[in-house]
Every structure is written in C-alpha cells, then in structure tokens.
Amino acid sequence: MRPPMQGAFSRETALADFILPHALPGALNGRDGIKLLSLDCFDTLLWRDTHAPKDLFGALPETTVTQRQWAEERARLAAELREKRGEVSIEEIYRELLPNGCADMRTAGVRNEIDAEAAHCFAFRPTVELMRTAKSRGLQVIIVSDTYLNPDQLRGLIAAAAGDDVAALIDRVFCSATYGKAKSEGLYEFVLEELTVKPHEILHIGDNKRADVGGVAPFGVHTLHLKQFAESTEQRLRLEAAVGTMLHPAASEIALTHQPHRAALSVEEPVIADQAEAFGFATLGPVLHGFDRWLADEAEALQAKHGGKVHHVFLMRDGHLPQLMYQARSGQAGHAVEISRFTATASTFVDAEAVQRYLEIEVEGDPVVVARQMLLPKDEVEAIVKKLPRGNAAIRGQAFFNAITTPSRIRRIVKASTAFAERLVAHVRRTVDPQPGDTLMLVDLGYNGSVQNEIEALLVRSFGVHIAGRYLLLREQFRAGYDKRGFIGHDHYDGYTLEALCTNVAVLEQLCTAAQGSVVDYAADGAAIRKGNSIKSRQSAIRERIQAGAIRFARTQAEITIRSASVNHAAMWRRGAAAVMGRLMYMPVAEELAVLGQFEHDVNLGVDNTVALFDSEIARKGLRQRGLFYMKGADRMYLPAELQGEGLALKLSLLAHKRFGLALKYADFIDQTISLPLIVADGRDVSTGNVTATPTHDGYYIAPIPVGDCRFSVGIQFGQLFDYVQVDSVTFMPVDRFLSDKAVADNGETEGNPSLEGMTQAAPHLFHCADEYSFMMVPPPPRQGDRQMMLAVVFRPIARREAKPAPATHNVLLANGASA
C-alpha cells in the first residue's frame, strides 16, 4: 500500500480551495497540468429531490425510513466487528433488513431502492458541463463515491437518472463498498493504485469537505470543495424540511421532504446581489413555479374534457405574478381580467332574495362598507348610517336590515346591480372574448374562490362557456359545487392544514399582486375603473424586484437539471411548494423580514383600508401580557413575522397549534404560578390578600387584580418575594376586554401611576426592594360609570428574596445527661 504523501502535498491540503456550483463548468480553467477529472457522485454529479438522503427511504415499499436506517446501522456494526471494515454493500444492508427473507426478496428490495433513487435523482447540469469540457480536452473522467452500491449499480443508476449520454462521459467508477473504506479512511489510496496518472495530475471535486478534501488531498491530489449552499440557504432548507414534515405526515411509498428547487438555489442564489430579488427567487419562485407547472397540466385536462379553447384568465390583482410566470414559461400572454370581490359581489343582486341573503351574511359588518357594496350613493349611505341606533349590536343590525330592505330601495339596488353586471360582462368580452363551448380557467391565489362563486352563473349565462377555478391555495368555506381545484387544496390536504396555510395568506397576496388600484367599476365598453392605489410607490418597486426574482427562478429551474427517469412531478412540486409557503408563513428569516418590513396590505373591499403586515412592538407587548394566546384574536395580517427574535420554539408551537387544530387553552400552558401578596384600600378600610400571577412569555408573569368600579387602591408587595423585580407595565383595563380573546389596538387601557415604598429604580423597569416590606402602590383610575375594571401588572422576577435562617437553638444538658 502506498502511504499518504507528505511534504509539499500536506501544505497543498492546508491551502485547499472551494468552488461554488455556478463556477463548476470553468473548474479546469488555469489547470493545464490536469489529466484526470475525479468527481464525487451524490450531491456533486447526481442530486436528489429530497432534503436528506434518508428521506428517499420513504419511497420504499413495505419499509419505513427507520427500518431502513436500522438495517444499515446493523450491517455496518457487523462489518466493523467481523472484518474491521467500515463500508458495506447494499446486499448486506438488505440481509439485515430482511433477515428471514429469501434471496429473491432481498434482490427485489435492492432493485426497489435503486429504482427509487433513479426516480428522485437528476444530474446537475453544471457538473455535466464540466465533464464535457474535460472530455473535449482529452481528460479522463472518474467517479469516486462513498456508497453501498457497487460500480455497476452506480453506473446503472447514473444512466437511469441522467441518461446514457451522461453515463458515457465516465471512464471508471470507484465505490467505497468495493474496498471497505470511505474516502476519509483512505479509499483514494486504492484509486491511485489502479490509475496510470500521477496524483498531481488529478483534480477531485466533491461536496463533503471532510471526505473530498480531507480524505483526498493528503495523497497529493488537487481538490476543490463544492460548497452547495450558503449557510442562510441551508437554514431555510432545514426549516422547510421541518415544516414539510409537519404538513405531510409520512405516507406509504412516498419520499419525505421534497425539495425540487435545491439545484436552482445552489446555482443562482449566490450571484443575485439584490436582496429583494434573491427573496423572490428563493422563496416565491419555487411556489409559483410549481403552481404554473400544475396549471399547464390542468389546462390540458380541461381541453380533453370540454373541447373548445381553454383560456388562461388571471384574476387581477393577485393573479398578476401567476400570469408573469405563465408568460415566462409559455411565451403566451394569457388574459388579465380585473374582477375583485367588490365588483363580483356588486353584480349578484338580481332580486330581493339576493339582497336579503347578502345582508343576512354581512349584517354584523361595517354598515358603510355593506351599503356601498350594494351600490347605494354615498349621501344615501351616510343618511342611513346616521339614523341607526347606537349601543346594542343586534338592535343596530336589525335597524340596518330594515332600512336597506324597503321595497323602493331594493328596486334601486337590483337595477344598479343589473347594469353593473352588464358592464362586467363587457369587460370579460373586451379582455377575453370567449366563444360558446370554450373554457374560462380562472386563475387566482385563492383561497375560497369567492369571485368564482359570485360570477360563474353570470358568465355561463352570458357566454355559454365552461368555468373552472384553479387556485394556488384552495380552502372552501362551503361546498359551492363548482369546478374548483387547488394546487394545494382539498384533494391532498385536510382542513386543518389548509386553514393553517390560509391564516397568513396576506403576505403571499402582497407579493403576487399588481401595482395598481383595485377595480371598483367598469365603463360601458368594459374598460376597468380603478380606485387610487393606496400602496406606497416604494413598496411597489420592492415587489417588482421580488417578482423578477420569481421569474428568474422559473428560467433557471428549466435549465439546471438533467433527468431521464420519470417521477410524479406534480406531487413533488406540490409538497415542496407547500413546505416553502408554510416556512415563509410561520418561520420567516431575518433577510425576508428586512424586505417585507415596509409592506402594507390593501383589504380590497372597495374602501381605502390598508393594514401593516406585521408589528413587532404589538407582539412584544402581547406576549408579555398574554403569552402566545395573544395571537388568537390579534388583528394582524402576518402574525408569525412578529415573533422574530422570540425563538423557534414559539413559532413551532404556533404552527403545530394551527396545523393540527389542537384544542389547547391558556390554562394548559401554565405549569407554575406565583402567589403575589397585595394590600387593598378604599380610603376607609385596608385588607390584605393574594392574587395568582400566571406565566406569559420570556419569564414574565401577569397578575390580574380586580378593582371593581375604580374605588380601590392596590399595593403590590413585591418586597416579600423579591430583592429585584422587573415591572414591564402597570395598566388598567375593562374586565370584559381583558377576558376577551380579541387583541385590538384600543382595548380601553390606561396607564397606572404607581408610587414606591421601599423600592428604588435601578434601571428602566428594574426595581430594587430594600426589604420584605417594600411595595408598589397604584391608585385607581377615574371611574367609567359602573364598568368593572382590573389592574394588570406584568412583571418578571430577577432575584428572589432568600428566606432568613431560623434562629439557632441550643440544647441544655441536665445533670443526669438528659436534654431539654
């Protein structure tokens, strides 16, 4: 055996370089002395569609992932004990997996695994380009792989996954299973013995630094470490794998954690300088690309079913980016039809029953919004609202219902709606001009398909066409009975999963929308009439760069892989896209939030309301006051973004709660309490007692102290328990607001004005209690009639007061030796 080379080659090892994936085709440039190109196989030449190699074991029939892992562990242990051999063959693994199986069963198991690998592997195009360059220069190309396959099996896998032409570029294949040693254990020593070139004439490239550099460079071979991903990309992929596992429980014969976008990320993301474009490429791109591939399949199926022409009708504004992705793939424009929830609903009031049905659903909504939706003039809306009684919501709702449903008012609503519907039809004719028998494939993000629900009957009646709604994310609130399907929808996901993904869908809407105002009406010729765009121009510019990144992904993805074996692309991209979307919605990373920090959301209901996507200050306050359950009713658009900086555990808890519909309550999260001593005084009497403080978040507790109708002052005797205590807030609020699940911006809070007795402020919010008699006295706020109020004290113990030792006792010895 040849010993490891020393001297100059050890210095070469210390200087070993790396290469990024996009630079692979030029790896031989400037290396004129190289005569042989040596490549690792997996994650260098062949890449998988899964996050980790073990995830592919999920595709094996009648075998769990853990069973396959245990079998390999046992085989390696046996080889080490019996033969001092670190590497094993796949046949040895299947002998452990099927200890009582016959030879035919084990052979079939091996074949199934190799077939599964072929279905989920592809050749990485930059590596193949490098191999072709090497062959054009007259170099030999070899594969040196740490694998339990033998050379014939590995070459066959390469041919099955990437094609015979790629396999033909390879002169020889070396596998660790053949020699019983991995690269890190000296495999390359055997490789060199079988080659006719000298070590310094070889360039070896692989993704595992320990194996492909540390195990190869000591022999005098030039090495390059292929760095697949930046650390930030690796983190996103890990989080996506975790989210994907929660969204997709293990299913029989389906690989785990599909990530078909890995190769595109590795090549293109490092060369994108703009942060917004990189965000669109890495996160939005895989989701919308998968959706677009699915739309192509759906259009083909609709064509076969109905005949005629299938029109891609993208509903603006949220259908804007799906249309751009379609244009990038097909080279066709599609149809951008501007139909909002407002205009769709405005066209539906065909009779008194339709008006009443709408009012019954929306009676608790804002009367101004509801009345304007029914196309009543502004001055008439103001007059109706002005006459509504104040106070009880039910009485107010009934009065509004009665005001709208007078016969004369209903006649005017129906007349206005009929004319509106005619203008909407003119808009569709102007934009699409479908012929009888055609199919209008309505494309939107989703998620209930409300526009389709409202306009389907109108479009079928007006044009004699078929209507098919195709949505990125579909979670119907009721079974409409129409032709609706979701790329991520009821066909493949349960209701809790869909609800979890819909909860934060506002962020996706803002990233996909067009930079224009929402349509509110149409001219007689069908031209769209829009309201002013309330979104800032800076936000629109950022969004356009994000969308450019998504389109860049689609173009890169189409060119980066070489694959021969067939695979269920629709399922793979669906599962991968769901994981990416879920990760963005529940575990956004800092770079993404830096881009999204200035975004606002347009509610798209014919009014000028915009809402900030997230507000970290509200989250910090809510978490300290109420814990994670503040989010249950918080009026926010992108709640998990507010948890940035609060730790992964909180985000995982939120995702698990939503994904599985867990019936947990606030009390279930309380595993310890503090009994906080109080002094209560009303000016005449003083009493003492205790209140139970419960944990919220980050070590904070909340003590809810009833103060009735603001007659009581409260002294909080912190000194009995703590030397140092951090007091975050001391506020009064109505009891009914505190007990409500709804966290609103104005919950009737008023700041308390405490005085200190024996307590000194050591730093902002931090107080030192001089002794056990130290307390904080809080006088009541001004009375609000007989409304019951409470004092909410949010605090965090810093240093607990140590109990004083008991006085020492001494036994008195009596003369007879007894003690007393």
Image (cartoon, grey):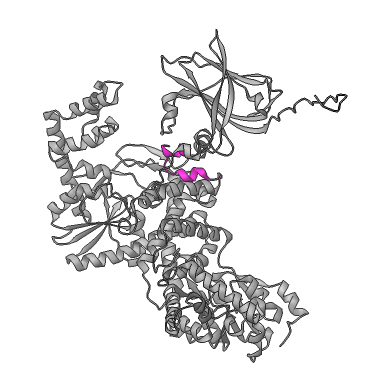
Q: Tell me if 748 is positioned left or right of 800 in this view.
A: left
The picture places residue 586, in percent across and down from the top left corner, at 46, 49
* Picture quadrant of residue 165: bottom left
Residue 220 showing in the rendered view? yes
Q: Tell me if 114 is positioned left or right of 647 in this view.
A: left
Q: Residue at x 19, y 51 (%)?
A: 456
Q: Tell me if 662 is positioned left or right of 698 in this view.
A: left
**812 or 439: which is nearer to us?**
812
The picture places residue 576, in percent across and down from the top left corner, at 42, 62
Q: Tell me if 798 is positioned left or right of 707 in this view.
A: right
**771 or 284: which is nearer to us?**
771
Looking at the image, residue 760 lies above or below residue 654: above
Q: Residue at x 29, y 66 (%)?
A: 297
Quarter containing the N terminus: bottom right
The residue lying furthest to the front in this view is: 816
Looking at the image, residue 242 lies above or below residue 173: above
The residue lying furthest to the top in this view is: 684
The residue lying furthest to the bottom in this view is: 196
Quarter containing the C terminus: top right
The picture places residue 216, in percent across and down from the top left corner, at 66, 78
The picture places residue 288, in percent across and down from the top left corner, at 38, 59
The residue lying furthest to the right in this view is: 815
**Residue 639 forms part of the magenta stretch:** yes
Looking at the image, residue 157 lies above or below residue 291: below
**21 or 148: which is nearer to us?**
148
Q: Residue at x 46, y 41 (%)?
A: 614
**Residue 88 forms part of the magenta stretch:** no
* Magenta segment: 629-645
* Picture quadrant of residue 373: top left
Q: Residue at x 30, y 40 (%)?
A: 605
Residue 182 showing in the rendered view? no
